[in-house]
Image: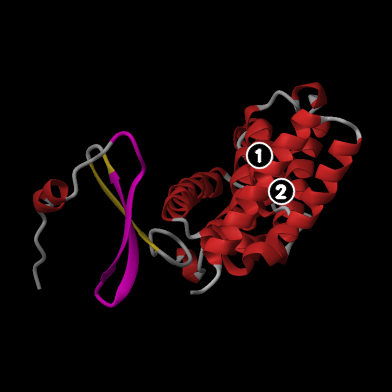
Amino acid sequence: MEYPQNIDHILKQWPFDPSTINVRKLWIDERQVIQLRLDMGVLQMEVVHRPDGKRPHGAKTYFEYVSRLAAKAPDQFHLLPEHCAEIDREFAQYYHRRICWLQLQEFEPAVRDAEHTLQLMDFCKRYSHDRDWSVAHEQYRPFVLYQRTQAAALAVLEHERDAGAATALRIVDDGLEEIRQLFIDYSAEDQYDSDELVIQLREFRSQLQKRFEPVQTLVDQLEAAIAAEDYELAAQLRDRISQQTDSAARSKPA
């Protein structure tokens, strides 16, 4: 059976918008795929295991394959150039799918893909004899941790809403601590507070706290602010209580 090779109709029907990440999920031949529109074409990815749908040496992923090799002789195994080339390919594939999941606001698969990348980074650091190659990947670890932390917190809130707020905040705190430890490990702790990812993650935490902080806690803070004659803070707290109360009222069923 011959399939059409011309994709002009797809590119015309789905124009590229440079101001956003152009991604969609659709069904093809009874399976779901993700498509990422680029300026000169389309990337198509499977939604499970390897984004390209391949099974390297019968494994679900190349990471699984090299992990099997390492398990046979963990003290003697090291990554060869051909391993590194295939690992680079898998890193790139999982990066593209991870940003697609985030754009689609499907947070649990985004977490899974981020975890795959982080575990593969750990594997590379352990078994590579090429330090420069390992460092080239390690420099992106804070970014992957940042995305995994946000996705994990949002996944909790997606299922539990207000009840999951405390868990989401703990996830963000744990993510910030992991990133801080990286700065310590690389003797760069003095750069931690000014790092853009840290700033953004702290802002994300602040937004979560303001949105889901229990009204009673805010009332207690308001009473303390009034007692201390901090009327500017009291006014801010009244606004937040009003916002929380209005939000709760809107969320109640009619």
Q: Which residue is mark 1?
A: 201
Q: Please report whichever mark, 2 or 1, sits nearer to the chain's N-terminal start.
A: 2
Is the stretch drawn in magenta largely helix, strand or loop? strand
In the visual, does 206 lie left or right of 222?
Answer: left
* Nearest to the observer: residue 61 or residue 47: 47
Residue 141 in sight: yes
Q: Tag on residue 38?
A: none
Q: Residue at x 71, y 48 (%)?
A: 172
| Type of amino acid under label 1 | Leu
Is mark 2 in CB contact (under 8 Å) with mark 1? Answer: yes
Q: Residues within 10 Å of mark 1 (few under 14, many from 20)?
A: some
* Whole-number angstrom distance, CA of label 2 to CA of label 1: 7 Å
Residue 204: give x, y in percent of width and height.
63, 42
| Type of amino acid under label 2 | Val
Residue 1: give x, y in percent of width and height.
10, 73
* Nearest to the observer: residue 254 or residue 40: 254
Q: Residue at x 33, y 64 (%)?
A: 33
Q: Which residues are magenta?
A: 18-37
Q: Residue at x 62, y 64 (%)?
A: 161
* Nearest to the observer: residue 136 or residue 116: 116
Q: Secondary structure at mark 1?
A: helix
Residue 18: give x, y in percent of width and height.
30, 34
Q: Is residue 38 magenta?
A: no
In the visual, does 162 lie left or right of 30?
Answer: right
Q: Which residue is mark 2?
A: 172
Q: How many marks?
A: 2
Q: Quadrant of residue 4?
A: bottom left
